[in-house]
Amino acid sequence: MPGSELAFDENCLIVARDDQLQVISRAKTTTLKTRNLGLLHRRLSEYICGRYSEEAILLAVSAPQRASVERYLAALRTAGALRLAAPIRGRFVFSSAEQIGRRLLRIRPESKDSSLAYVAVDSADPRKPSLAADAARLAGWLRGIGGQIFEGGRTAVYRLQTEPLRVSRELVIDGPESVATIPRQLGIVRPTEFSQLPLVSLMASHWLFPETLVSPETRFVPETRFVPETRFVPETMSRFGVSYELVEKRLMREFFIQTLERCPGLACADTLGNLRALALDRSAASSPVEGSWEVDLFDEPSDHPQVAYLLSVLKTRVSKLPGMLSRLRSGAFEYRVGSSRSCSLLRLKALRDVLLEIVRRMFYDFPEGTREAPPEPDFDSFATAADLKRMFDTAENLGRSSRCLRYRRISCWGVTAYYAKGI
């Protein structure tokens, strides 16, 4: 039972020889003698460390040796060399990966939860029905290092794998400041198998969130029609960009929103202003064309660092980049180069978006049917706050933003995101 684990008294000194032990304490010195006592002590001393109870130690030795071990432990107890280890203040929670993932999403920097050690059980584990029988044994084993797990109100996440039986530590949260390190500890965002030059290519997924990145599957019912299934199939979320930090933050925002809302395809941004600008951009893109003209994208304005970088990359492959530039009735700019298209109320952003897509197509090979990733809604890097406000005011005056949208805000693990349905 917890709290009955044996440990040596730190106030005693034990000197071992071949056939005897000397137990030296502040009150007295006791000499214990029997054949091979020193050898027995050296073999068992590593297990008398606060991790194992007397019952566990006796069960670990062969039946013929148990009487000797019982006499050895009784003699040490009489000499005052043994004590019971202090009980560990903390508890173990055995649960599915998905349930633990949801609990982690509710952790906040200001949370003052008690010490916990979550043990994630693979939902596909064929031995799951017998987990209850293993839980006590595994908890006892984990409790052996519990002093490290629960020190200072620490929370840890372990993963249980049974073929072969193995428990690995995945995450440690030891204070409010460590909550923001959860994504890095879990490795939610990581590089894809694609080359990281000339673009950054990252993906987001994790086994603790098995249904995080999902898309509805369509099922055909004979003699009726196609109907949406309630089941979901995994979808790999990957994004390309120029900056590792920006792509990482974008993926984390999308990861949280899809995890919490269980709805793929929600528009999101890091600020409310960027999300409002994204809504205006998508509305403006459906406006009719007022005029179009041929352009060489190498001659277009390049006053943005990302635009300048992407142009320099493309110049290593081609000498000209012909395309079409259109002005829509809504005031938006639309670039078309082959099958690549972009549209935005901000000309430089529209140029950056189409250049990013061209570089992605030119330098990377994708499987048939790969869906295009939406452009990054980083409007504040192309316009000042005053410019964005004027854009919002103009849209209000022209009645372009009459459609009512409900914006929401989430904050998780130090990442803040704004999102809306119906953009």
Image: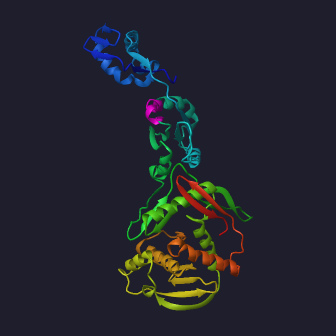
Q: Is residue 240 left or right of residue 398?
A: left
Q: Is residue 33 left or right of residue 268?
A: left
Q: Residue at x 62, y 56 (%)?
A: 232
Residue sitting nearer the eye, 165 or 107: 107
Up the image or down, 29 lies above or below 396; here it is above
Q: Residue at x 60, y 72 (%)?
A: 278
Q: Quadrant of residue 419?
A: bottom right
Q: Residue at x 40, y 87 (%)?
A: 320
Residue closest to the far front: 386
Counting from the top left corner in percent of width and height, residue 354 is at: 50, 78
Residue sitting nearer the eye, 73 or 372: 73
Range covered by the magenta-colored residues = 141-151
Q: Quadrant of residue 50?
A: top left
Residue 262 in magenta? no
Up the image or down, 85 lies above or below 104; here it is above
Query: Magenta stretch mostly in which secondary structure?
Result: helix
Up the image or down, 297 lies above or below 135; here it is below
Up the image or down, 83 lies above or below 337; here it is above
Counting from the top left corner in percent of width and height, residue 197 is at: 37, 69
Q: Is residue 233 visible?
A: no
Counting from the top left corner in percent of width and height, residue 202 is at: 45, 62
- Quadrant placement of the C terminus: bottom right
